């Protein structure tokens, strides 16, 4: 964006941040000189894959496998919004921070839930129906 306008603005910072988010998500640099086609530029590649609904083909599979679905969806949507070419449609950096916090909360909630499920299932002794008492009393 800076190369096109020769102006550094809040909007160009948001666009650049969107590129960084996709660099992280795809585990690659913004420009990859090993390609001589649209894949050379990460924003161009992202735009093409986004419209073809094939972003999963460029996302780092190891990272993707660690992400909770809602967190992933919010992260991708936000990163893509940051690549908007129309500066008037770009999210504010405050909005970006807020949405990243929400994506993180989804991830943390999922991680805590998974940890609790694993702890509960590993600490629970296996039982059969014969082990369950027919009557029970509850004392406080």
Image: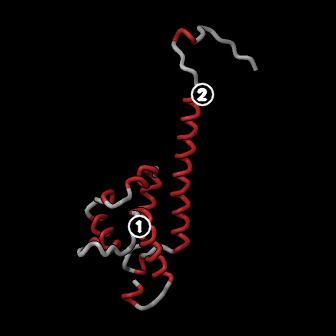
Above or below 84: residue 118: above
Q: Residues within 10 Å of mark 1 (few under 14, many from 20)?
A: many
Farthest right residue in view = 140
Pointer 1 or 2: first along the chain: 1
Nearest the camera: 38 or 106?
38
Give the camera-side residue of 9 and 86. 9
Q: What secondary structure is found at the residue carrying circle 1?
A: helix
What residue do we see at 45% from left, 90% from top? 7
Q: Which residue is mark 1?
A: 22
Residue at screen point 47% across, 76% down: 14
Residue at figure coordinates x 55%, y 67% from the top left:
97
Q: Quadrant of the N terminus?
A: bottom left
Q: Quadrant of the C terminus?
A: top right
Measuring from the top left, give residue 72's x and y in whole percent: 44, 56
Q: Is residue 102 left or right of residue 86?
A: right
Q: Percent from the top left, x then y, of residue 59?
A: 36, 59
Residue at image x 30%, y 73%? Answer: 44
Query: Residue 70 location in percent, x, y?
Result: 45, 52
Q: State the colouring used for the structure image.
A: secondary structure
Please provide percent x and percent y for residue 62.
41, 53
Which secondary structure, mark 2? helix
Q: Which residue is mark 2?
A: 123
In the rendered structure, find residue 90 and report the number of the disc placed on it: none
Label tally = 2
| In the rendered image, the vertical position of residue 4 relative to residue 119, given as above or below | below
């Amino acid at each position: 964006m800076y190369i096109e306008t020769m102006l550094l603005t809040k909007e160009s910072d948001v666009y650049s941040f969107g590129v960084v988010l996709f660099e992280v998500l795809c585990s690659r640099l913004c420009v990859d000189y090993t390609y001589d086609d649209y894949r050379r530029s990460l924003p161009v590649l992202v735009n093409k894959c986004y419209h073809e609904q094939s972003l999963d083909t460029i996302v780092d599979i190891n990272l993707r496998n660690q992400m909770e679905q809602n967190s992933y969806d919010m992260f991708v949507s936000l990163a893509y919004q940051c690549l908007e070419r129309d500066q008037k449609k770009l999210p504010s950096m405050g909005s970006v921070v807020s949405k990243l916090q929400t994506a993180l909360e989804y991830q943390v909630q999922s991680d805590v839930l998974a940890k609790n499920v694993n702890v509960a299932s590993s600490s629970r002794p296996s039982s059969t129906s014969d082990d369950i008492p027919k009557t029970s009393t509850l004392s406080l």
